[in-house]
Image (tube, rainbow, N blue to C red):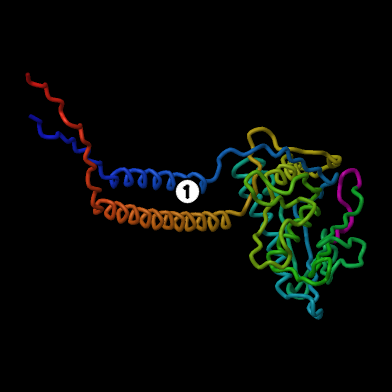
């Protein structure tokens, strides 16, 4: 007699749940990667930037500047005059922001009186600084420049005589005209020289902005998207050294010799933008952050929808029929 054949059904587990878990895990990894790599790094390497002073100082707290436009020249943009005036006023605003954060409040005694020839009814006959415009430095004494500042040799560390700044309207190839932002940046750089600063040794600050007093312009001339540059904390620290005589409420008998300066410990190397521009940049950053959050949310929603659809499709798959496994016939004991 034979027992009926015994079979064992090996029921296969539906793969839908496993795929759903894998997809959700992949989604989580993707979101973490987006958030991590899109966030700025807090740690920054020390730049080791140095700036030399020019070896002189103005012996007055009020510095007069006259801007001479070229209204009859075809290459001259009328807005250049106000660009230069804006560059000078931004130095004053940056001084306020710097002294609020780092002291040296005596720097606020520095006053800059800027006049535009042909606009202001009266201008000083012998200004401390005169600013002129030329078409280009192509073929000139400084063929690769966008601006130049000529300072008479200081006497006992005191600037004497008139300082002259020349600003080009076109790049050294005489093919690309400076935008208003370009002119503000170049005029700001040259005004730093006129105040007694030389060139900084690095092109960018630790916060990723351009070093205003670096020897070459870091942006493409003529690009309408060029950003405004501002004096750095290094530039301001050097300025506070050049004009430390203002802390004594007395006229200087002599200025400091040419000196190499670096930031003291604890002072971050960054650009010192005027407060109004800081607020605008903060608003732009918030808007950008909101946009990035919205993009991440949309991407996450799409991925989640795909995961759900994928999971539903997998759950509807019919499992394959079980493969019967035969134990074989049960042996019987022979009877006598």
Q: Position of residue 121 (x, y in %)?
A: 75, 74
Is 237 placed above or below 335 here? below
**Residue in the foreground of this view, choosing between 237 and 184:** 184
Quadrant location of the C terminus in the rendered image: top left
Is 93 placed above or below 249 here? below
Residue tagged 1: 34
**Residue in the foreground of this view, choosing between 334 and 204:** 334
**Residue in the foreground of this view, choosing between 133 and 117:** 133
Q: Residue at x 75, y 51 (%)?
A: 213
The quadrant in which residue 73 appears is bottom right
Q: Residue at x 39, y 48 (%)?
A: 27
Q: Residue at x 68, y 59 (%)?
A: 89
Start-end of magenta stretch: 155-164
Q: Tell me if residue 157 is in the magenta stretch.
A: yes
Farthest front residue?
A: 336
- With 262 as the anchor, is 55 left or right in this view? right
For the stretch drawn in magenta, the main secondary structure is loop
């Amino acid at each position: 007699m034979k027992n009926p054949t015994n079979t064992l059904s090996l029921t296969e587990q539906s793969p839908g749940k496993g795929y759903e878990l894998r997809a959700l895990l992949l989604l989580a990894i993707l979101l973490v990667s987006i958030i991590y790599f899109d966030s700025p790094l807090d740690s920054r390497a020390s730049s080791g930037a140095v700036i030399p002073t020019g070896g002189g100082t103005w012996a007055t707290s009020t510095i007069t500047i006259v801007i001479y436009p070229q209204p009859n020249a075809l290459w001259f943009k009328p807005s250049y005059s106000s660009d230069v005036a804006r560059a000078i006023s931004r130095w004053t605003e940056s001084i306020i922001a710097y002294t609020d954060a780092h002291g040296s409040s005596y720097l606020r005694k520095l006053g800059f009186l800027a006049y535009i020839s042909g606009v202001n009814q009266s201008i000083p006959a012998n200004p401390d600084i005169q600013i002129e415009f030329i078409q280009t430095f192509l073929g000139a004494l400084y063929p690769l420049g966008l601006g130049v500042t000529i300072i008479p040799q200081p006497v006992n560390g005191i600037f004497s005589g008139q300082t002259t700044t020349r600003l080009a309207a076109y790049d050294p190839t005489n093919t690309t005209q400076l935008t208003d932002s370009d002119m503000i940046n170049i005029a700001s750089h040259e005004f730093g020289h006129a105040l007694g600063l030389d060139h900084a040794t690095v092109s960018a600050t630790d916060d990723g902005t351009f070093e205003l007093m670096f020897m070459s312009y870091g942006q493409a001339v003529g690009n309408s998207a060029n950003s405004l540059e501002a004096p750095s904390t290094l530039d301001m620290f050097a300025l506070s050294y050049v004009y430390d005589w203002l802390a004594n409420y007395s006229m200087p008998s002599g200025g400091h010799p040419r000196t190499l300066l670096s930031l003291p410990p604890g002072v971050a190397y960054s650009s010192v933008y005027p407060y109004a521009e800081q607020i605008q940049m903060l608003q732009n950053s918030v808007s950008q952050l909101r946009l990035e959050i919205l993009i991440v949310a949309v991407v996450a929603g799409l991925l989640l929808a795909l995961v759900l659809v994928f999971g539903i499709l997998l759950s509807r798959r019919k499992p394959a029929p079980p493969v019967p496994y035969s134990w074989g016939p049960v042996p019987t004991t022979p009877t006598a």
